[in-house]
Image (cartoon, rainbow, N blue to C red):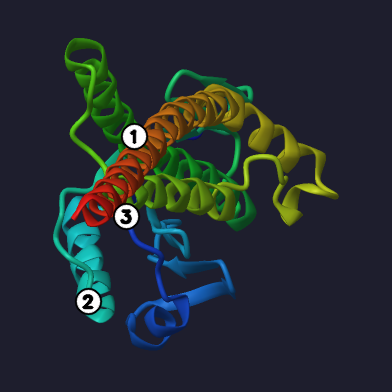
Amino acid sequence: MEQAIKKTITGYHLGDRLDLKELKNNLAFNCIYADPTELMYDAENSSYIGIFDYGSIVFFGVDYSTQTNIINAVRTILNIGSAELKRENFDVEINPDASYKVIFDRLIIKTLTIDIAKIIMLNIAQSVALDYYIEQSNILLQQTFQFTMELEEKGRFSIKGNALLKYIGRLLNLKNKITQNIYIFDSPNLTWNDEYLNQINSDLSRELDIKLRHSSLQDSLNTVKDNLDILKDINQHSYSSKLELIVIVLIAIEIINLIISKIL
């Protein structure tokens, strides 16, 4: 009976898109796979590093010290700031005597191949990216809630004009990034002709609640957008009312001046 091997997968999201061409030319590891959206490196002893252009880096069985060194190297190469990163862990147990199973934060498989590692890392990359975008949407939702509370309590709100338009732009940019970077409805090419890989991908996606979290994220962003649209309409109405009042005052002044000139 062979002893089971446990591998920990750790995913990070750096909050920025990554220039994979620049990284490929500068990272001193053995690159075993590269395409425009993903790099995969061999870290030896059935350990791997996956780097995704939408900002996620995933380590498969790589020690924490090496993880830190690689993240620092990526930040240096691409001139990325040192903000705190979103992080997610997942375990893989490789046991020839066990049956395939996905339970909570653990996957049990009989053998490990590079393709299986790629599917696992892709799902963790998507999951930690979702965590990052959910956090960003929650910040927008909380700030928008404060504006609506001001409207309820004071009959006015503090964000207006260009500041409101910039805030709406921030929301739209976040929605665009999510659309560009989260491919949850597209099965990886590897799974198209391999039933086992497709099963692993589907089971991991379900276990990580990727589609459910994506749907919740979209609902939150739509709520923010609906609220901001209302605030924008109120702001425009208030601005139009002020313009109308100014026009009325100017007309009144002109009439008064005309009357005075007639009397004199």
Q: Residue furthest right?
A: 193
The mark lying in front, picked from 1 and 3, is 1
**Going from the N terminus, do you reach mark 1 or mark 3 first?**
3
For residue 129, side relative to residue 188 (left or right): left
Q: Amino acid at mark 3?
A: Gly
Q: CA distance from mark 3 to mark 2?
A: 13 Å
Q: CA distance from mark 2 to mark 1?
A: 44 Å
Quickly name the residue at label 1: 238
Specify the quadrant of the image occupied by residue 33. Answer: bottom right
Q: Residue at x 53, y 42 (%)?
A: 123
What percent of the width, then of the height, locates residue 46? 45, 56
Q: Amino acid at mark 2?
A: Asn
For residue 148, side relative to residue 222 (left or right): left
**Going from the N terminus, do you reach mark 2 or mark 1 first?**
2
Q: In the displayed structure, would residue 210 be above or below residue 86?
A: above
Numbered disc 1: secondary structure: helix
Query: Residue 79: which disc?
Result: 2
Quickly name the residue at label 3: 15
What percent of the width, then of the height, locates residue 36? 59, 73
